[in-house]
Amino acid sequence: MRKEQLEYFFQTYYSLVFRVAFMEVRSHCDAEDIRQEVFVRLLNYNPKFKSIEHEKAWMVRVTINLCRDFLKSKWNQSTVGLDSIPMEEFGHFKSPYTEHNDTILDLIELPERYRQPLYLFYYEDYSIKEIAGVLEIPENTVKTNLKRGREELKKMLSKER
């Protein structure tokens, strides 16, 4: 891979990979490690992409797979993590339209099957078709998980008030 290509991937996907990893592992340090591993895999495999959408989907898919592997790992299961995420960690997820974005705190608490589609749809602006491709599930499953995830999120938000 040429230096220019690598710089392009870093500039384009560096923060996206971190945000997706952080949503999954809920740890800044672990998300950093996963982000590093994603770029190492990019260098090692040097995949040929058909389009920008294919690039982005590959980066997100590899990130999610590495997060799943990490969460299943013996090391992760035998360590004690923090029960809560420090508020300063959420600076990466600030919405440009609001001063406070507490919804992300509730989104992190949702089960993975709802959290991933909601995050990709609302925070990364993926279409339902793109989400289905990245998560390797049918479009109707994405629609169902989005609907159920919104309902769960609505329940969580109404309890807080």
Image (cartoon, helix red, strand yellow):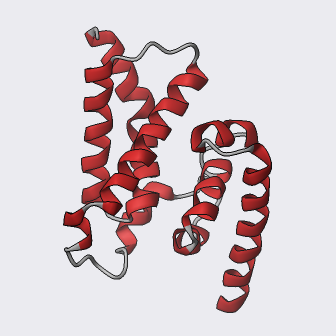
The front one of 91 and 18 is 18
Q: Give the left or right position of residue 49, taking residue 74 as reference.
A: right
Q: Give the left or right position of residue 97, taking residue 25 as reference.
A: right
Residue at image coords 51%, 24%:
55
- Image quarter of the N terminus: top left
Percent from the top left, x then y, of residue 37? 26, 39
Percent from the top left, x then y, of residue 155? 73, 83
Percent from the top left, x then y, of residue 52? 57, 20
Above/below status of 96 relative to 81: above
Above/below status of 157 relative to 31: below
Residue at image coords 35%, 13%:
5
User: How many discs appear?
Assistant: 0
Percent from the top left, x then y, of residue 32? 27, 50
- Image quarter of the C terminus: bottom right
Residue at image coords 72%, 60%:
145
Residue at image coords 41%, 43%:
63
Q: Give the left or right position of residue 128, taking residue 101 as reference.
A: right
Q: Quadrant of residue 53?
A: top right
The front one of 53 and 159 is 53
Above/below status of 8 relative to 147: above
Q: Quadrant of residue 137?
A: top right
